[in-house]
């Protein structure tokens, strides 16, 4: 119906004089025109005369062709007009045009099978007729290919409308209707398969419908046979379509059919030269060929069943010739850096040596580029023995680690070690040893395993394989950083980064730079950490790398750096830190690991309206981290930050329990000592605070900057309570000295009353006065609250208020008198400067107490 409307529109439009329909045999051109003309007679269109002329081989002679056209039109030329014209190639066309000019009624002239017109004289006259026919005449030209006329001149005049193969293909609904006419009903899945294989080619759909009708209970088997090119389809293609294709083009189609899709350059690699000419000729012959622009090149794809037919012809070339074609294709793909399609071609080559050479050279690269799953799938399907090689199993481990699946990686590593003991690999033993060392280090770091006893050689032996050497350098360096050997780890990471950049491995480069950012984080070089994190993200953006565990960690560290500098972290970075990824078992895990998730929750706390719920999320994530990955270097520094969050919402008991869990998990690290000192200072136990801090601060130069700053600020506050101004001033000054090089301001905002001390001693810090002033004027500075703190009992009563319970109900729950509760409520209202329960709740939520 849609096509018939297009035909109506073309004929009824005043400026359309020619309609060209070109498509392969069996596309339904003749049927379409016949049905359209039949329906048009009874429609609401102007009365139209119809003339139909089907070209035959005998018409390639001027007199015969024009006689047939005149007969179809019912036009008889008198001898007088013809004698008055000189005999030329176009005299018949001119005479016919003159005769038709007197016809008032619109006329449609159909020239069917026009591809048979090849005689130059006939074509010259026909072209003249088309260009000069009366306005009342519309000529429809239908054929397998367009006759060789100057179609561009009609195009430029706007008098030409074209319909091609794509316009004539059947839709899913039409396929279902045609199959129903043959007595077979197909499911949606079966219809989709028929459409995919035939691409709606009407003749092929009819053959398929007939075959499916003959096998009503075996549709799946019949469709499988269709995918292999059944005899009925092959015979039809050979008789009606392929015989018209010149021999040299058939050879081109045969050679290139070994590929699902190909470019002109790739075709040249297969057939020698001449792909450009062959593709041009196929286009001129209206061969069903689709093209897609990809990476600046046109990639061509044959109709599925035609490709099946020509691929069968390729198999008749013999095994040796076929292998040569696949080898040429594999070489081309490798030269273009397209390793996955190169592998698929090599798997078609019997020579196992070529395949193992490829895997040795490019297997690690495929894994690092994210093509590991395809590598293993192809090997398992075509070369299961190679898929069981120890080296391939180690590549599986790397793939799992790249995806962040530590559990899978550990399982694969066990299999790889077992296979190494049972059989010899196709790669040297030193490759396996180096890769195993790197993998073990990666699993240890990712899994939070203690690295104290992990043996890392002084120098990582080179294998000569750039990808393996690069990966080994980066992973062992990460293990060194994780166990505190930061300087050595950084040297090795920079070496790995240079290898990654030289080899063109963006994922490894991102991995290396992210680990360098982690090394900076470990030593408190906050500015360097931020710079390296942003560099990692810039590499990812430049290479269009999607979000990975590394990019998530880079965003997390960039956000943490902004937080420590007193800046507002990018909300997108916080969201990335809190994002999850699907594990193989269907569960959701943190995309950047538990460390990133804890940092994300800390940063989210500042933005949250419900501070209580946000603080609980921080505590929960930190406890999970301590339970699963209690790595001292990376976990310990998060403890004090979490303590400040819990104290902000007046949960000292929860904070104390959290710190005790941390002591059990990772021991008395400096950060945990500082966290304990913060808790003692929160309850005004200054003596205990000093007892904890004095031994620690005696070696303050060895502490992480954030730990040192926090320790000195707590030291100053503990002496403030003891009225020892000299020590207070000394503690504040030393905190500023530790903070200034990296401009770390966050501890001054987290520790209650720290900014008050800066106010008290303003102008007395010498070289650090400007930095102290920056902190004092910062919008995040928190000075002593105007409302005095609530007592523990008042806090208990305050937390009952959101429930809406009455004072009597609260008294009953607490086991006290109603007068006691009312006394506490008066104290709460007074300290919060509120005169109602609603006002008290609002102030408490605003301050973070609820």
Image (cartoon, helix red, strand yellow):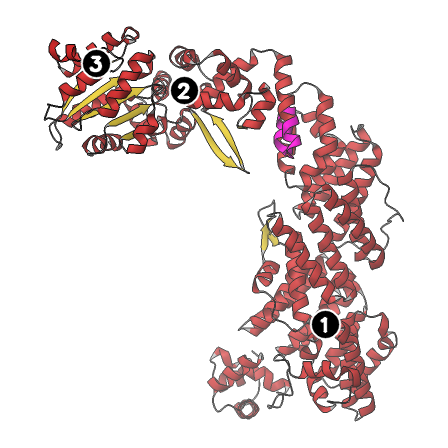
Q: Which residue is mark 1?
A: 640
Which numbered disc covers residue 92? Answer: 3
Q: Residue at x 68, y 43 (%)?
A: 400
Q: Nearer the viewer, residue 138 or 822?
A: 138
In the displayed structure, would residue 432 be above or below residue 406? above
Q: Residue at x 48, y 23 (%)?
A: 279
The magenta segment: 331-348
Q: CA distance from mark 2 to mark 1?
A: 76 Å
Q: Is residue 93 magenta?
A: no
**710 with respect to 305 (left or right):** right
Query: Mark 3 vs mark 2: which is more N-terminal?
Result: 3
Q: Nearer the viewer, residue 774 or 395?
A: 774
**767 with respect to 220 (left or right):** right
Residue 580, located in which quarter of the rendered image? bottom right
Q: CA distance from mark 1 to mark 3?
A: 100 Å
Residue 15, located in which quarter of the rendered image? top left
Q: Name the image quarter holding the C terminus.
A: bottom right
Q: Which residue is mark 2?
A: 285
Q: Nearer the viewer, mark 1 or mark 3?
A: 3
Query: Mark 1 vs mark 3: which is more N-terminal?
Result: 3
Q: Is residue 342 magenta?
A: yes
Q: Residue at x 65, y 70 (%)?
A: 563
Percent across and percent down for residue 217 are 38, 20
């Amino acid at each position: 119906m849609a096509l018939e409307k297009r035909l109506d529109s073309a004929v009824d439009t005043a400026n359309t004089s020619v309609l060209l329909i070109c498509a392969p045999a069996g596309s339904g051109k003749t049927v379409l025109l016949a049905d359209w003309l039949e329906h048009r007679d009874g429609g609401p269109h102007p009365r139209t005369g119809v003339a139909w002329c089907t070209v035959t081989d005998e018409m390639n002679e001027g007199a015969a062709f024009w006689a047939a056209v005149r007969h179809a039109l019912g036009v008889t030329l008198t001898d007088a007009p013809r004698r008055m014209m000189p005999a030329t190639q176009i005299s018949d066309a001119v005479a016919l045009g003159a005769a038709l000019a007197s016809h008032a009624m619109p006329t449609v002239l159909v020239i069917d099978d026009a591809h048979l017109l090849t005689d130059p004289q006939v074509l010259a006259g026909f072209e003249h007729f088309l260009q000069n026919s009366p306005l009342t005449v519309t000529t429809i030209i239908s054929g397998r290919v367009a006759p060789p006329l100057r179609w561009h001149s009609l195009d430029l005049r706007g008098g030409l409308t074209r319909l091609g193969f794509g316009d004539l293909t059947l839709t899913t609904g039409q396929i279902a209707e045609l199959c129903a006419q043959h007595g077979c009903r197909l499911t949606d899945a079966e219809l989709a398969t028929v459409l995919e294989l035939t691409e709606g080619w009407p003749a092929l759909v009819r053959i398929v419908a007939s075959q499916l009708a003959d096998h009503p209970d075996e549709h799946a088997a019949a469709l499988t046979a269709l995918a292999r090119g059944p005899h009925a389809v092959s015979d039809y293609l050979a008789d009606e379509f392929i015989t018209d294709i010149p021999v040299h083009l058939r050879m081109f189609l045969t050679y290139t059919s070994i590929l699902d899709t190909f470019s002109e350059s790739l075709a040249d690699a297969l057939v020698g030269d001449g792909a450009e000419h062959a593709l041009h000729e196929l286009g001129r012959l209206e061969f069903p060929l689709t093209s897609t622009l990809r990476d600046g090149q046109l990639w061509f794809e044959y109709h599925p069943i035609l490709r099946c037919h020509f691929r069968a012809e390729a198999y008749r070339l013999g095994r040796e010739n076929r292998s040569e074609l696949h080898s040429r294709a594999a070489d081309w793909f490798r030269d273009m850096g397209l390793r996955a399609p190169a592998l698929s071609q090599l798997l078609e080559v019997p020579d196992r040596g070529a395949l193992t050479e490829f895997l040795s050279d490019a297997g690690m690269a495929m894994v690092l580029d994210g093509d590991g799953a395809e590598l293993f799938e192809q090997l398992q399907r075509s070369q299961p023995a190679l898929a069981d090689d120890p080296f391939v199993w180690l590549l599986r481990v790397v793939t799992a680690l790249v995806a962040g699946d530590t559990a899978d990686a550990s399982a694969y590593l066990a299999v790889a070690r077992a296979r190494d003991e049972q059989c010899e690999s196709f790669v040297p033993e030193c490759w396996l040893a180096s890769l195993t060392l790197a993998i073990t280090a990666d699993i240890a770091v990712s899994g939070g395993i203690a690295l104290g006893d992990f043996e890392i050689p002084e120098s990582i032996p080179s294998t000569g394989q750039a990808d393996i050497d690069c990966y080994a350098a980066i992973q062992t360096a990460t293990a060194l950083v994780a166990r505190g050997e930061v300087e050595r780890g950084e040297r090795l990471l920079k070496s790995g980064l240079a290898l990654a950049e030289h080899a063109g491995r963006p994922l490894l480069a991102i991995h290396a730079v992210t680990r360098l950012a982690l090394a900076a984080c470990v030593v408190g070089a906050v500015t360097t950490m931020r710079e390296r994190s942003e560099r990692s993200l810039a590499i990812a953006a430049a290479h269009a790398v999607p979000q990975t565990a590394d990019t998530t960690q880079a965003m997390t560290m960039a956000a943490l750096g902004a937080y420590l500098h007193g800046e507002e972290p990018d909300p997108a970075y916080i969201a990335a830190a809190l994002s999850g990824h699907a594990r193989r078992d269907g569960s959701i895990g943190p995309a950047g690991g538990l460390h990133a998730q804890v940092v994300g929750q800390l940063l989210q706390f500042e933005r949250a309206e419900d501070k209580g719920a946000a603080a609980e999320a921080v505590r929960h994530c930190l406890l999970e981290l301590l339970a699963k990955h209690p790595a001292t270097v990376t976990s310990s520094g998060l403890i004090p930050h979490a303590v400040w969050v819990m104290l902000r919402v007046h949960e000292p008991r929860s904070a104390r329990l959290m710190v005790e869990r941390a002591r059990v998990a990772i021991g008395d690290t400096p950060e945990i000592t500082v966290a304990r000192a913060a808790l003692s200072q929160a309850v005004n136990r200054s003596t205990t605070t000093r007892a904890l801090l004095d031994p620690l601060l005696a070696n303050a130069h060895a502490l992480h900057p954030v730990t040192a700053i926090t320790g000195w600020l707590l030291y100053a506050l503990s002496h403030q309570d003891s009225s020892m101004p000299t020590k207070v001033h000394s503690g504040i000054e030393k905190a500023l000295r530790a903070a200034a090089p990296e401009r770390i301001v966050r501890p001054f905002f987290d520790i209650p009353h720290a900014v008050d001390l800066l106010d008290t001693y303003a102008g007395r810090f010498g070289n650090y006065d400007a930095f102290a002033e920056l902190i004092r004027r910062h919008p995040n500075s928190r000075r002593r609250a105007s409302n005095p703190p609530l007592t523990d009992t008042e806090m208990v009563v305050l937390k009952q208020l959101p429930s809406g319970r009455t004072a009597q109900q609260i008294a009953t729950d607490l086991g006290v008198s109603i007068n006691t509760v009312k006394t506490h409520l008066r104290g709460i209202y007074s300290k919060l400067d509120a005169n109602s329960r609603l006002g008290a709740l609002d102030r408490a939520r605003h301050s973070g107490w609820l």
